[in-house]
Amino acid sequence: MSELVADDLPKNNGMLRGLHIQAAAPSTAPTPTAPNADPRFLDALVLEYIDGHNWKVVNEFIYQTDVDHLSRIVVPACFLTDFASVPKLLWNIMPPTGTYGKAAVIHDYLYRTPKQASKDDADSVFLEAMKALGVGWWTRNTMYQGVHRFGGSSYKGGL
């Protein structure tokens, strides 16, 4: 497998823009681009497609936050993510992957990994990371309110 940049893959409504993905190499593999220009994201997000719903983080992915005591969030290699848990009915207007994809991976990690962050802190990091990625106000706040109000059953952080 070789590294591809999502911008070089079919757009699927633009849902994969800005993400690095592991996939079978085409006859001439494109050159990967630099990680997100925002200095909070310290690494490129490199993923391997698993099963139509889940993706595996290939290399450690680090995000620098100002939220509470968290400071530096390290998503380890081999962590599985499904990006944003948006009900399928809403995928046409808010797909699971979008400009908020990197923020969703960080949020998944904080929600699924014990003793990393409280639910409120994880939700605040999600909001902060979406803002850092340039996600528009309406989308950013809709996503945040969705996880903040309805994400409790998915939170496994244990703080």
Image (cartoon, rainbow, N blue to C red):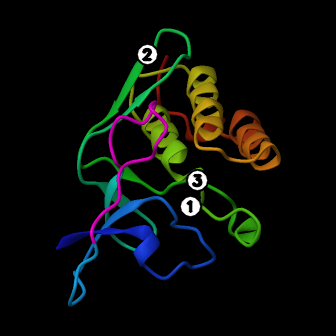
Q: Please, what is the three-letter code of the amino acid marked with disc 2? A: Ser
Q: Please give the name of the residue rendered at 44% of the width and 46% of the height, measured from the top-left corner.
A: 36
Q: At x 74% / y 43%, what residue is drawn?
A: 146
Residue that mark 2 sits on = 71
| Residue 94 visible in the snapshot | yes
Which amino acid type is shown beneath numbered disc 1?
Thr
> Residue at image x 57%, y 79%?
12
- Helix, strand, or loop for circle 3? loop
Name, please, the residue furthest toward the bottom.
Answer: 27
The image quarter containing residue 29 is: bottom left
Answer few, some or many: residues within 10 Å of disc 3's Cα (few below 14, many 20 plus, some between 14 and 19): many
Secondary structure state at the residue bearing disc 2: loop
* Nearest to N terminus: mark 2 or mark 3: 2
Tag shown at residue 84: 3
Position in image of residue 123 (x %, y %): 62, 30
Q: Which residue is mark 1?
A: 97
Question: Spatial distance from mark 2 to mark 3, Cα to Cα?
Answer: 22 Å
Residues drawn in magenta? 31-44
x, y percentage for residue 47? 32, 59
Q: Position of residue 154 (x, y in %)?
A: 56, 41
Task: Please tell me whether mark 1 sits on a helix, a strand or a loop.
Answer: loop
Which numbered mark, 1 or 3, is in the foreground of this view?
A: 1
Q: Nearer the viewer, residue 132 or 98?
A: 132
Give the mark nearest the N terminus, 1 or 3. 3
Q: Please tell me whether mark 2 or mark 3 is closer to you in this view.
A: 2
Q: Which quarter of the figure has residue 5?
A: bottom left
Whether residue 49 is situated above or below residue 113 in the rendered picture: below
**Distance (Cα) linking label 1 and label 3:** 7 Å
Q: Nearer the viewer, residue 42 or 55?
A: 42
Residue 12 colored magenta?
A: no
Q: Is residue 115 visible to the viewer in this orientation of the structure?
A: no
